[in-house]
Image (cartoon, rainbow, N blue to C red):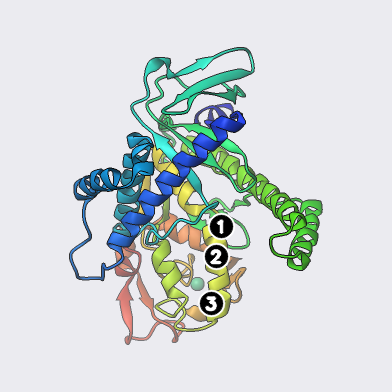
Amino acid sequence: MLIGRLIGVSRYRLSPTPAQERALAEHCGHARFVWNLAVEQHAHWRPGRRSGPGFAEQCRQLTQARAEFGWLRGGSIVVQQQALKDFAQAVANFFGNTHRKPTWRKRGHGEGFRIVAVKAGDVRRLSRTVGEVKVPKVGWVRFRWSRAVPGGVKSYRITLDRAGRWHVTFAVIPESIPVPGTGEVVGVDRGVAVSAALSTGELLCAPTLREAEKARLVRLLRKLARAKRGSNRRAKVKAAVAKLKAREADRRRDWVEKTSTDLARRFDVIAVEDLKIGNMTRSAKGTVEAPGRNVRQKAGLNRSILAAGWGRLVRRLEHKACGRVRKIDPRYTSQTCNACKHMARESRESQALFLCVACGWRDNADINAAKNIRDTIKDTAVGHTVAARGGAPSGGPANREPQRDLLLVM
Ligand SMILES: [Zn+2]
């Protein structure tokens, strides 16, 4: 797992002086202001209408805004322009159906900014454990040299987490891992009880808090509910809660790195569900998979899917297993029997168990789905198989659809 650690986790703890911290916070404020300005300009967008102003137009507006507001002019143009770039990317992701619509940024949530055009001398090592990075308008800020800084850093991002910790992340696209050449295809299904199920039968769990930590979190949240708004005590409890959550996020990030490296090394082709988290979220209101059933339950389920960092896992896979990731339409993969290809919602006995109503095949529901995902790649002749839709076990002549259409390779 050494490589996974080296290329994935390029985040370092910053230790700014109090004065630097104020300057960094100001950059964050500018980035947030510019982002929110862009959100406002896009707010009038509706499906079918022309999209809002593009990046170039917004840059012109930024110049105007800087002319108008002295405090904005005093800030770094790089920080402000990159905030617009980030927003343009977020909009592209939204239209690409991989992310939700970008929304307002609140103070204290996801604070950060990006610096580009970093020169070779802008990151340097001072001692065995201390390095420093040059930040425009702030100067040299020290960071903990906890691992080797990758060479050729072109950009970095500085963030403030909910626990009040500053980090710098140097942008390095991880090297692509060579094809193992085993000819093996794996299907990966995003689970709920577990974070990912593999067609090999493996169930992978992203780490969460340990039991003692969970108990502590519950106690803290109870305390928080009782603490008076604006009190010192409340601020303290809030910071403790944030620290626990940040720890959990760190562990998950680490897990994503290890898992993506492992999959890229073991399999030639990795088949995953197409990343339409937006669609999944909408399906809570009722669509193909479960028309309007268990809306509440599904809403909770969607939250945990998002929390499981599925999107990040797929992104890292695409970096590491470059050109070897296939995204497939996930519809019906969870309702189709991998043994006989019969499709029926009733076969999904429970969240955890798949029990085919036609042939009696039993499997973990997520693994059954992962196998179907894998087979869309493996078995291109699957189009000959005919699946009966919801009902008649042996498949009457009615309601027949070729499997090929059900499991479209995107
Ligand atoms: Zn079956």
* Quarter where residue 251 is shown: top right
Q: Are marks 1 and 2 in contact (CB under 8 Å)?
A: yes
Q: Residues within 10 Å of mark 1 (few under 14, many from 20)?
A: few
- Residue 164 as seen in the image, left or right of residue 77: right
Residue situated in front as seen by the camera: 211 or 33: 33
Whether residue 214 is visible here, answered yes or no, is yes
Point 66% across, 48% down: residue:
248
Where is the N terminus found, in terms of image quarters?
A: top right
Q: Which residue does the image show at 53% across and 61% down from the upper left?
A: 305
Label 2: state its secondary structure. helix
- Which label's residue is closer to the chain start, 1 or 3? 1
Circles 1, 3 touching at the beta carbon (< 8 Å): no
Residue 254: x %, y % from top left: 59, 40
Q: Secondary structure at mark 3?
A: helix
Confirm whether residue 185 shows in the render. Answer: no
x and y percent of residue 257 in the render? Answer: 54, 39
Q: Which residue is mark 2?
A: 303
Element type where label 1 sits in the image: helix
Q: Amino acid at mark 3?
A: Ser
> Is ligand 1 less than 8 Å from the beta carbon at label 3?
yes
Residue type pointed to by label 2: Arg
